[in-house]
Amino acid sequence: MTNITLADYAGQIESAGRLLSTARRILFITGAGLSADSGLPTYRGVGGLYEGGLTDIGLPIEEAMSGAMFQLRPDITWRYLSQIESSCRGAHPNAGHYAIARLEAMHGTVTVLTQNVDGFHLDAGSRDVIEMHGTLRRLRCVDCGRSRHVNNYAGLSIPPDCPHCGGMLRPDVVLFGESLPDQAVHRFEQVLAAGPDMIVSVGTGSSFPYIAGPMLWAIEHGIPTIEINPGGTPLSDSVMFRFRLRAAEVLPALLDAGGYSLDSGRDARG
């Protein structure tokens, strides 16, 4: 990719910002590329924690962090879960997270569906967040079902034991090969049934059907779609606006173009 800058997209930023200002129900779909701007690795992407295919014990990360491996060898799965948590520790939300939270506060009907498990959307102030893959910060006992919130894994024995029954704790995340959580899926179905009139895909490769499906539906029905991703995706050539830049650059610029600057006091609901 050549050295594309925000200035190269000035016209598209203005056009997309105008549509943002008139949208009533906005859906953001976010992936690891958004948190990459906070310094987190994307794990399997360019520059990712496990780029090259295999972990340090010779297993594909998809196998090491699978539900089947957790059943057989929870110590292996926990080894890489704790590595991922360690890479998140000390990192913070970036300008992209804060821009989405600002839009929700000023606009109202903004929903975030995220694949990320780092909790940064909530840290930034977003409230209507669907954590489709769960969160590293909630540990759940596989035996008694009780859960606890933790800020990080510092001081935990790995794998950790349940303080209530002595059973095995696991992060409340979706491991490879496991089903998506029913509650999150139901919430997402409700959002789609309400009919978003703008969908913004941020930092995700759009490989999962529950991401590609809504985007394709919006494209087919002429509903504005925005893709923010330095790389390409299967939907890149079909979306209404495509920005091959970092989300931390584009999202604040889109809000400013839509009149949602920090000092505007704008509220699109009234």
Image: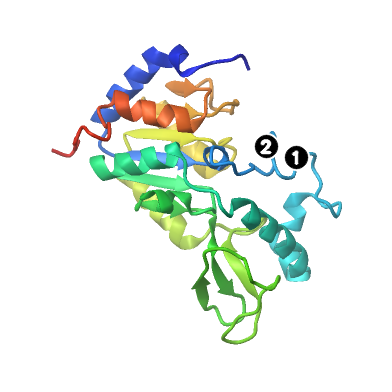
Residue 213 at x, y percent in the picture: 49, 38
Q: Residue at x 71, y 44 (%)?
A: 49
Q: Locate residue 45 relative to residue 193 in the image: left or right.
A: right
> SS class of the residue under badge 2?
loop
Of residues 225 and 194, the one nearer the viewer is: 225
Q: Is residue 123 visible?
A: yes
Badge number at residue 212: none
> SS class of the residue under badge 1?
loop
- Image quarter of residue 107: top left
- How would you rate the neighbour count of disc 1 (Cα within 10 Å): few for under 14, some for 14-19, many for 20 or more? some
Q: Which residue is mark 1?
A: 51
In what quadrant of the picture does the N terminus appear? top right
Q: Locate residue 210 relative to residue 27 in the image: left or right.
A: right
Residue 18 at x, y percent in the picture: 28, 22
Badge number at residue 45: 2
Q: Residue extending furthest left? A: 270
88 lies above or below 102: below
- Image quarter of residue 158: bottom right
Q: Residue at x 77, y 63 (%)?
A: 76
- How would you rate the neighbour count of disc 2 (Cα within 10 Å): few for under 14, some for 14-19, many for 20 or more? some
Q: Is residue 108 visible?
A: no
